[in-house]
């Protein structure tokens, strides 16, 4: 793995943080009365924190750069809100593991589609038959991992 090891480890840490984030949001939703209160509270706090950090190190975005971005990139924040709402609704029912395996399966399928189509400016990559079999096994594994009788 060599020079990629630090990046791999960062992604592993990121995965652990995502695993904590969903249950935290689910609990916050219980305490605040619902997912919309949770999104508003969490994103307001995060925005204020980032404003302080970016202001302190001089990395606030320039208005000209914000205006130059294509309109569709603003969907990133909207998607974040939707993801938090979904996590607060599903984690109490699926559990953290069930939520995460379904989340990863969705990410993998979507990622394969984005790679194949070159979505969002990505270079186009065509999956091999082996890649598609692996993806199908991953989705089947997610279904089995969340399967509950009755």
Image (cartoon, rainbow, N blue to C red):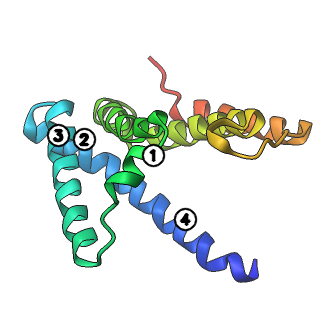
Which quadrant holds residue 113? top right
Q: Nearer the viewer, residue 25 or 111?
A: 111
In the displayed orientation, state which residue is furthest to the bottom. Answer: 2
Q: Name the image quarter holding the C terminus.
A: top left
Could you say where residue 23 lies in the image, as x and y percent from the top left?
A: 30, 47
Could you say where residue 57 lies in the image, as x and y percent from the top left?
A: 29, 78
Q: Earlier in the sequence, mark 4 or mark 2?
A: 4
Q: Label 3, on which residue?
A: 40
User: What numbered label is drawn on residue 68?
Assistant: 1
Q: Residue at x 83, y 36 (%)?
A: 133
Q: CA distance from mark 3 to mark 1?
A: 27 Å
Assess whether mark 1 and mark 4 are in contact (beta carbons under 8 angstroms). no
Q: Label 4, on which residue?
A: 11
Bin the neighbour count of mark 1 within 10 Å (Cα to Cα): few under 14, some 14-19, many 20 and up.
few
Q: CA distance from mark 3 to mark 2?
A: 14 Å
Q: CA distance from mark 4 to mark 3?
A: 27 Å
Q: Label 2, on which residue?
A: 26
In the displayed orientation, state which residue is furthest to the left. Answer: 32
Q: Nearer the viewer, mark 4 or mark 1?
A: 1
Q: Nearer the viewer, mark 4 or mark 2?
A: 4
Assess whether mark 2 and mark 3 are in contact (beta carbons under 8 angstroms). no
Q: Residue at x 16, y 44 (%)?
A: 28
Can residue 141 be seen here?
Answer: no
């Amino acid at each position: 793995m060599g020079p990629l090891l630090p990046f791999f480890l960062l992604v592993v840490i990121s995965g652990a943080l995502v695993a904590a984030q969903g249950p935290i949001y689910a609990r916050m939703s219980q305490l605040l009365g619902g997912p919309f209160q949770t999104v508003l509270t969490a994103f307001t706090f995060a925005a204020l924190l980032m404003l302080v950090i970016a202001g302190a190190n001089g990395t606030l975005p320039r208005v000209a750069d914000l205006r130059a971005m294509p309109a569709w990139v603003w969907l990133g924040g909207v998607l974040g809100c939707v993801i938090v709402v979904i996590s607060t609704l599903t984690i109490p029912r699926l559990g953290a593991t069930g939520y995460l395996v379904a989340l990863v399966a969705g990410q993998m399928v979507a990622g394969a589609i984005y790679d194949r189509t070159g979505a969002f400016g990505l270079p186009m990559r065509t999956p091999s038959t082996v890649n598609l079999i692996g993806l199908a096994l991953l989705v089947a594994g997610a279904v089995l991992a969340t399967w509950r009788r009755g």
